[in-house]
Image (spheres, rainbow, N blue to C red):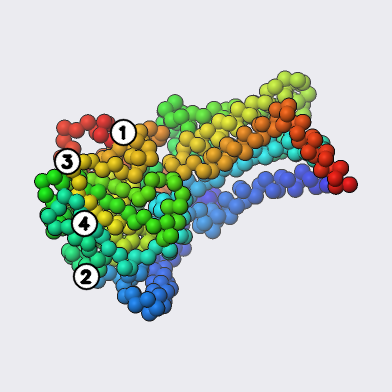
Amino acid sequence: MSIRKSWDVPESEITPLKVYRERRQFMQGIAALAAGTALGIPPMAAAGTKLAGVRTSAYRLNEDRTPYKGITTYNNFYEFGTGKEDPSRRAGSLITRPWTVTVEGEVRRPRTWDIDALLKLAPLEERVYRMRCVEGWSMVIPWVGFQVAELIRRAEPNGNAKYVEFVTLHDPKQMPGQRSRVLDWPYVEGLRLDEAMHPLTILAVGLYGEVLPKQSGAPVRLVVPWKYGFKSAKSIVAIRFVEKQPLTAWMRAAPREYGFYSNVNPTVDHPRWSQAKERRIGEFRKRDTLMFNGYGDQVARLYSGMDLKRYF
Amino acid sequence: MKRIGKPLLFLVCLLPLLRLLWLAMTNGLGANPIEFITRSTGTWTLVGLLLTLCVTPLRRLSGWNGLIRYRRMLGLFAFFYACLHFTTYIWLDQFFEPASIARDIVKRPFITVGFAAFVLLLPLAFTSTRGMVRRLGRNWQRLHRLIYLIAFLGVLHYLWLVKKDVTLPLIYGAVLLILLALRLPTGLAMLTEVGGRFRQGGR
């Protein structure tokens, strides 16, 4: 049947990734050059620009990577609209340079990081992670970034710092989705300090070895692979160390449906739908969802003794 | 018009399906094609139901009683897209696992109401033939008032499945409310009057 074709395209019909990206890179290069010349912005900020000096890491999942096109056209980024293709269509209005990230709160060394300094905070490495959305689909994504722990160590949290809050830019002019009250802006996410310190937790600045596209949360976003995707805040402007558990955007929106932890857990359903299975983007059949998204060996100890049904 | 009206409507009603087939063949269904197909067939089921419910108010307003001839086809197309929607669910979402489907229907309120709406559509589709209309007599109309409940369950199904942005389900709900309100005696009287005045003014 012809319907099959859409997800079962023969290899020969797919535009080779290299050709596809070179084409994009070329167009974006031109656009960036034009914009850069006019505004004096270094062209390296544009998506599609290769990131230099990216190291490979041990955290590289041996599963088929979701194609670049899928990762960058099927997004939940309500700041640009609630449709899956809204972010890729509308995120062009986001200005990622200049950009600063404020590190503040219960720390000895608060600091406002310029994004280009942040990019040099630690060596960039590639991390190939599973990404499981709370809606029941998943991807395998080659991020580029560094461990959040690197930044935390430099901030020197004091004894009061129990949690870390991540805040997304709030500017309806750049983020047209924020004109709607669908969420209580700005988007806030949070982790326990030990979760944030975990070696799997990264700040991502790149995708497929290149500068992170705007629809994926440029210029810098959180990636916490054992939690549902919405925990990984995008386009971060502030990282705040706090004593009390943060009230996150989704907890405010629907406290019965979204808890603070939001660990991927096939045995704890969303109140309205099952979390036992997921559809990997590009695959036909559903696959079983893994406990902690398959990262149980690394992270289960963070939650030993906790009732994960209660702390969902 | 009488001759080509129905074939024309038939083709128009097929357009959503043709669009899906076209998108499927041109790799245009996006990163999650199964979700796209599920959403699209569900949307057109709802649109079909609401269009079916438009016939009576439009008849009153226009005074064109011939409109009634198109109602059955609209209703059956709503049923057709509901069948596609349901098939997508049991095949591409559940892969014909009876236990899993049964659990879903019992446990998930949005599946429960969607499934109920689909089951309630069945007797309406089966009694849509001329023979059945004759045989059932007055009971036919009583039975087919079920469409009010079905459309309501359809909107509820949509409302309960969206994650956060309920704009679209609420729009469908508002349209349904208006269409139902126009069926109350005052609504019908208003339509007749407005339509009559408009036609007089147009003369």
Q: Dot 1 surroundings within 10 Å: few (below 14), some, or many (20 or more)? A: some
Q: At 17% across and 64% down in the image, what residue appears?
A: A122
- Report the amino acid beneath label 1: Val
Query: Which label sits in the foreground, 3 or 2?
Result: 3
Query: Which label sits in the foreground, 4 or 2?
Result: 4
**Chain identifier of the residue bearing label 1 in the image:** A
Q: Are marks 3 and 2 on the same chain?
A: yes
Q: Which residue is mark 2?
A: A53
Report x, y in % for residue B98.
45, 29
- Residue B172 vs residue A312: left or right? right
- Residue B166 vs residue A276: left or right? right
Task: State the separation of the CA atoms marked 4 and 2.
Answer: 25 Å
Using the image, tell me which numbered label, if any, was put on residue A268. 1
Q: Is residue B20 above or below residue B149?
A: below
Q: Nearer the viewer, residue A36 or B37?
A: A36
**Chain identifier of the residue bearing label 2 in the image:** A
Q: Which residue is mark 4?
A: A103
- Report the amino acid beneath label 4: Val
Q: Dot 4 surroundings within 10 Å: few (below 14), some, or many (20 or more)? A: many
* Quarter location, residue A14: bottom left
Report x, y in % for residue A166.
27, 51
Do callouts 3 and 2 mark residues in contact (Cβ within 8 Å)? no
Task: State the separation of the CA atoms marked 3 and 1.
Answer: 18 Å
